[in-house]
Image: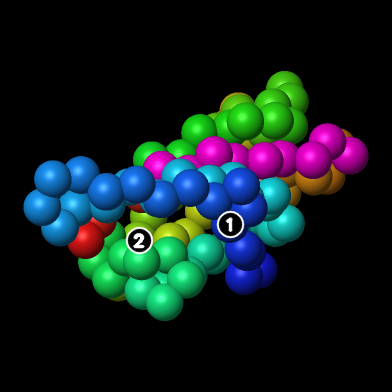
Amino acid sequence: MGALTITDLKTTEFAGDYKMVVGEVTLASASDTVTLTDATNHISEIHSVFATIKTGLTTAFVGVAATYSSLVITLTPFGTTGNSHVPNAEGASAVVALMVVGK
């Protein structure tokens, strides 16, 4: 499990207290984490996380699941069989786009 940093970070605010944080992470293992902070990301509560593959899609790496607890997002890439998969095993750099909605 690796701790990742969001790159190409963008933050915007909706009416009220809700915010959207958008960025990219390069996957490094079969289970990676991203930790948001109020000081850096201006978000103290996550309401939803959306993750999609931006680059690195292969016949063996077909999707990524995003779950969260508190301010920690766990990204789990998976292959065609549904099993956890290390996306860079084929030599392709796997970049995931994240969109986080919270307060």
The outermost residue toward the left is 16
Between 47 and 40, the one lying in front of the other is 40
Image quadrant where residue 53 sits? top right
Left or right? Give the position of 45 relative to 78.
left
The chosen color scheme is rainbow
Q: Which mark is residue 15?
A: none
Vertical comparison of 92 with 71: above or below? above
Quadrant the N terminus occupies: bottom right
Left or right? Give the position of 13 relative to 55.
left
Question: Is residue 97 rendered magenta in the image?
Answer: yes
Sequence order check, earlier mark of 1 and 2? 1
Q: Residue at x 28, y 71 (%)?
A: 44
| Residue placed under numbered mark 1 in the picture | 6
Q: Secondary structure at mark 2?
A: strand
Q: Looking at the picture, which amino acid does disc 2 mark?
A: Tyr
Q: Secondary structure at mark 1?
A: loop
Give the magenta-colored segment's residue range: 91-99
| Residue placed under numbered mark 2 in the picture | 68
Between 91 and 79, the one lying in front of the other is 91
Q: Position of residue 103 (x, y in %)?
A: 21, 61
